[in-house]
Image (spheres, grey):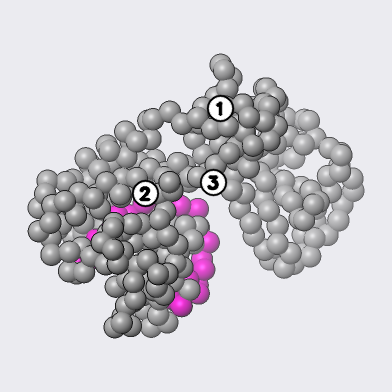
């Protein structure tokens, strides 16, 4: 079962329209500060599960100036769920700004709301808290975020990266939940050993990139389809550090049998770009890749002859740029 119970992107919200890409560095936990535990209050259209908001005051609205990546709250059957509402790799408009900056942009944090009720139902509060622990552990794994970089909106304000709000302390305080306890609970979840199988033959590399021309990162070990590796961490750009037997090294997430890990970042070239074509593991001359072409970044070379270059894919072709 996935941590993400549903996905309804708030595409009419101007924040979605801005579509500012980011690499998440942390997480901000919010609660809504209004007595309405239903996801449909904020998220629309109805997918048949959350229910319809007949008041038209949801956040999938061109006049809204706030937006977050997800909501924890009740569906129409009163089951507590997590709905994703923005891609996790674009900036949201959640926490406002403070004297040092804003966790919306710099550094950019993933942010979600928990839908408050009348703050008297301990069991609803605990269910939301437990769900938030799961969501944060999932996001920490997927984006290589440290649990120490999870903050409440209140803490974001105190650190100078958010507006002066009290959430979710205003709610959690009533039942004895704290942010330090919350971070501990996430860390506990993260400590659990995770084993994954390989969906195809792969290799364990010495560094977090593929050494196409054979002049830097060593292959520590070849791994066969179906064999299991112990997962250690995700670099948030499509690679994970894993353990196989006594060997520790890096493997592409696309080789691992799960969708819970990051994938290679994609981008559109902003100008014509000189590129070295790589064919049969050899440099095969230079080409210009045109402005506007969509590329997939497989890795950034960290040493060797092509240090500083990026190894990319355009369709079936491979290049260094
Ligand atoms: Zn908040």
**How many angstroms separate mark 3 from mark 1 (CA)?**
15 Å
Task: Please tell me whether residue 65 is drawn above or below residue 206 in the rendered image.
Answer: below
Task: Please tell me whether residue 279 is drawn above or below residue 221 in the rendered image.
Answer: below
Q: Earlier in the sequence, mark 2 or mark 3?
A: 2
Residue of label 2: 135
**How many angstroms separate mark 2 from mark 3 (CA)?**
15 Å
Residue positioned 21% across, 69% down in the render: 36
- In depth, the one of 30 and 163 nearer the eye is 30
Relative to 6, is 281 on the left or the right?
A: right
**Secondary structure beneath disc 1?**
strand
Local crowd size for mark 1, using a 10 Å CA cut-off: few (<14), some (14–19), many (≥20)? many
Please tell me in which quadrant of the rendered image residue 104 appears. Answer: bottom left
Local crowd size for mark 2, using a 10 Å CA cut-off: few (<14), some (14–19), many (≥20)? some
Q: Does any atom of ligand 1 lie closer than 8 Å to the CB of label 1?
A: no
The reply to whether discs 1 and 2 touch (Cβ–Cβ < 8 Å) is no
Residue positioned 84% across, 49% down in the render: 277
Residue positioned 57% across, 27% down in the render: 228
**Secondary structure beneath disc 2?**
helix
**Secondary structure beneath disc 3?**
loop
Local crowd size for mark 3, using a 10 Å CA cut-off: few (<14), some (14–19), many (≥20)? few
Q: At which x and y percent is residue 87?
A: 49, 61
Residue of label 3: 259
Range covered by the magenta-colored residues: 12-33
Residue positioned 28% across, 41% down in the render: 183
Q: At which x and y percent is residue 283?
A: 86, 42
Can residue 12 be seen here?
yes
Q: At which x and y percent is residue 4?
A: 42, 53
Residue of label 1: 229
């Amino acid at each position: 079962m996935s941590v993400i119970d549903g996905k309804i992107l708030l595409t009419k919200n101007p924040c979605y329209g801005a579509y500012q890409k980011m690499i998440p560095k942390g997480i901000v936990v919010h609660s809504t500060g209004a007595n309405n535990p239903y996801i449909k209050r904020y998220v629309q259209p109805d997918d048949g599960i959350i229910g319809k908001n007949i008041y038209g005051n949801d956040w999938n609205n061109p006049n809204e100036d706030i937006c977050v990546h997800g909501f924890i709250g009740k569906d129409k059957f009163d089951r507590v769920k997590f709905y994703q509402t923005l891609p996790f790799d674009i900036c949201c408009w959640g926490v406002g700004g403070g004297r040092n900056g804003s966790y919306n942009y710099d550094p950019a944090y993933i942010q979600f709301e928990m839908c408050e009720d009348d703050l008297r139902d301990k069991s609803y509060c605990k269910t939301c808290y437990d769900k938030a622990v799961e969501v944060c552990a999932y996001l920490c794994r997927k984006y290589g975020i440290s649990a120490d970089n999870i903050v409440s909106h209140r803490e974001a304000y105190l650190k100078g990266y958010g507006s002066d709000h009290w959430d979710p302390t205003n709610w959690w305080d009533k039942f004895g939940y704290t942010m330090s306890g919350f971070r501990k609970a996430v860390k506990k979840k993260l400590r659990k050993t995770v084993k994954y199988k390989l969906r195809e033959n792969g290799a364990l590399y010495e560094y977090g990139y593929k050494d196409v021309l054979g002049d830097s990162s060593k292959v520590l070990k070849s791994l066969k389809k179906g064999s299991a590796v112990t997962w250690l961490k995700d670099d948030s750009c499509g690679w994970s550090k894993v353990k196989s037997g006594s060997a520790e090294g890096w493997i592409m997430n696309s080789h691992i049998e799960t969708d819970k890990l990051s994938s290679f970042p994609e981008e559109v070239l902003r100008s014509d770009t000189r590129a070295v074509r790589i064919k049969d593991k050899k440099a095969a001359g230079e080409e210009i890749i045109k402005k506007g072409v969509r590329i997939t970044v497989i890795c950034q070379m960290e040493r060797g002859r092509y240090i500083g270059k990026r190894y990319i894919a355009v369709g079936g072709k491979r290049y260094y740029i």
